[in-house]
Image (tube, rainbow, N blue to C red):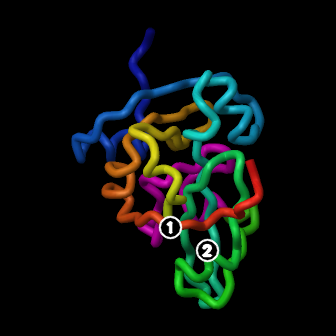
């Protein structure tokens, strides 16, 4: 196998001496996080997606939530001390984060935005997040992920979902 081209996220984890495991999968087009978890053969409840939000104030935020859940906009706004928040348009993802849709990692965006990881991540020794490009997932300890992202854990997902 040839030398792996590291993503920004991987370089940052390496620099902080945070161990991670790399998973790569075939990905031509955007696929959702459930499909990625299944393709990687990892538990869905430990697989997290990265959402970029914009508050009423105009500030950007990052939410890291389980792939099977949806964000609770009111709970997330409260956690972020905003009147309201909404997802940024898909067309803005690269300009705001430096990543493309389907390859947006909570680690190594253009700027360090306030980040919240859904509290269920604390139940696991390892969670799976985007490695910073389509077709790349990294397994990392959630506490170490929070440390490198300057994140905190909050309840930001809707209750009644699987």
Q: Secondary structure at mark 2?
A: helix
Q: From the top left corner, tell me how far across and down residue 2 is, in percent.
A: 43, 13
Q: Earlier in the sequence, mark 1 or mark 2?
A: 2
**Rendered residue at 58%/50% (across/down):** 104
Please state which of residues 74 and 113 is positioned toward the viewer in this rendering.
74
Residue carrying label 2 = 76
**36 lies left or right of 2:** right
Q: In this rendering, would 133 be left or right of 153? A: right
Q: Residues within 10 Å of mark 1 (few under 14, many from 20)?
A: some
Tell me the residue at 47%/35% (across/down): 138
Q: Report the Cα–Cα distance between label 1 and label 2.
A: 8 Å
The stretch drawn in magenta includes residue 79:
no
Q: Residue 33 at x, y = what percent?
A: 69, 41
Query: Please, is residue 74 above or below residue 70 in the view?
Result: below
Q: 110 above or below 31?
A: below
Res. 50 image quadrant:
bottom right
What residue is pinned by disc 1? 154
Q: Are marks 1 and 2 in contact (CB under 8 Å)?
A: yes
Pick the residue in front: 139 or 96. 139
């Amino acid at each position: 196998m040839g030398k792996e081209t590291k993503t920004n996220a991987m370089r940052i984890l390496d620099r902080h001496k945070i161990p991670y495991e790399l998973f790569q999968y075939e990905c031509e087009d955007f696929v959702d996080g459930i499909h990625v978890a299944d393709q990687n053969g990892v538990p869905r409840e430990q697989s997290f997606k990265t959402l970029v939000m914009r508050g009423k104030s105009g500030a950007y935020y990052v939410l890291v939530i389980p792939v099977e859940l949806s964000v609770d906009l009111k709970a997330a706004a409260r956690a972020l001390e905003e009147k309201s928040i909404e997802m940024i348009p898909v067309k803005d993802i690269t300009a705001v984060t430096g990543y493309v849709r389907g390859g947006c990692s909570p680690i190594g965006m253009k700027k360090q935005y306030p980040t919240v990881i859904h509290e269920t991540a604390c139940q696991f020794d390892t969670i799976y997040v985007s490695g910073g490009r389509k077709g790349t997932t990294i397994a990392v300890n959630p506490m170490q992920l929070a440390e490198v992202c300057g994140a905190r854990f909050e309840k930001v997902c809707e209750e009644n979902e699987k």
